[in-house]
Image (cartoon, helix red, strand yellow):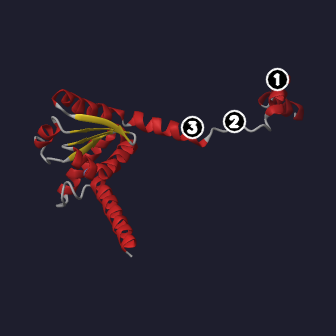
Amino acid sequence: MSGSTNSRINANCPQPSADDSHEHEHSNIDPPSWPRGSLLIVLKLVKVVWASPNSLLGVCVGGVGLIVGTRVRFRGGCIEFWGGSIPWIFSRLPVRPGAMALGHVVLAIDEATLHRAGPHERIHVRQYERWGPLFLPAYGIASWWAWRRGRRAYRDNPFEVEAYEDDARRAALETTRVDDNNR
Ligand SMILES: [Zn+2]
């Protein structure tokens, strides 16, 4: 009886073969560790791909204006478009924004607005990296939900709350820095 048990155990746990023992010889060697920089690059690429449907939309909106004077540059991991046809396009949207992020694309009516609103839009870029193709539907639902509860559809949208809180933190930091310099 014990013999049959042993043979069952042996069947489920075969003795190491010559090849296995060869593997075991190397099992004490640590797997090659990835440099931290490589992991960060892979993570960034995943975020770029995840947000890419929105970025593609942004490139289309900004790109069509290049023939009528829209300007473009690549800065801080984002493509920035401003001027040209963008004021005309934004004036036809219900909320008439000065600037807007679509994935890793930031669009603005002019360079001054791009400069002023850039940090706020970068928060939305981070949100696109988290939400990917779900960002625009989630943003719309969040605005609708805020409006349904009698709040402001834009400013009480949690995505905007996060971006405006960051604006406030940055402004407070800037004030502290100016105060320190004036002492
Ligand atoms: Zn915003």
Instruction: Kindly identify which residue carries mark 1.
Output: 19
Rounded to the nearest angstrom, the CA distance separating label 3 from label 2 is 13 Å
Q: Element at badge 1? A: helix
In this rendering, would 19 be left or right of 50? right
Q: Element at badge 2? A: loop
In this rendering, would 134 be left or right of 140? right
In this rendering, would 145 be left or right of 23? left
What amino acid type is highlighted by mark number 3? Ser
Q: Which label number is shown at residue 131?
A: none
- Say whether marks 2 and 1 touch (CB < 8 Å): no
Q: Is residue 112 above or below residue 77?
A: below
Q: Quadrant of the C terminus?
A: bottom left
Can residue 7 be seen here? The reply is: yes
Instruction: Kindly identify which residue carries mark 3.
Output: 38
Residue drawn at 30 percent across, 52 percent down? 120
Can residue 9 be seen here? The reply is: no
In this rendering, would 110 be left or right of 36? left
Residue drawn at 36 percent across, 37 percent down? 51
Image quadrant assignment for residue 131 = top left
What amino acid type is highlighted by mark number 1? Asp
Mark with earlier residue (3, 1): 1
| Residue 39 point in image, percent of width and height | 56, 39
| Residue 59 point in image, percent of width and height | 28, 31
Q: Element at badge 3? A: helix
Image quadrant assignment for residue 71 = top left
What amino acid type is highlighted by mark number 2? Pro
| Residue 168 point in image, percent of width and height | 31, 63
User: Given this view, does label 3 or label 2 mark the residue nearer the observer?
Assistant: 3
Instruction: Kindly identify which residue carries mark 2.
Output: 32
Among all residues in the image, which is located at the extreme bottom?
183
Among all residues in the image, which is located at the extreme front?
182
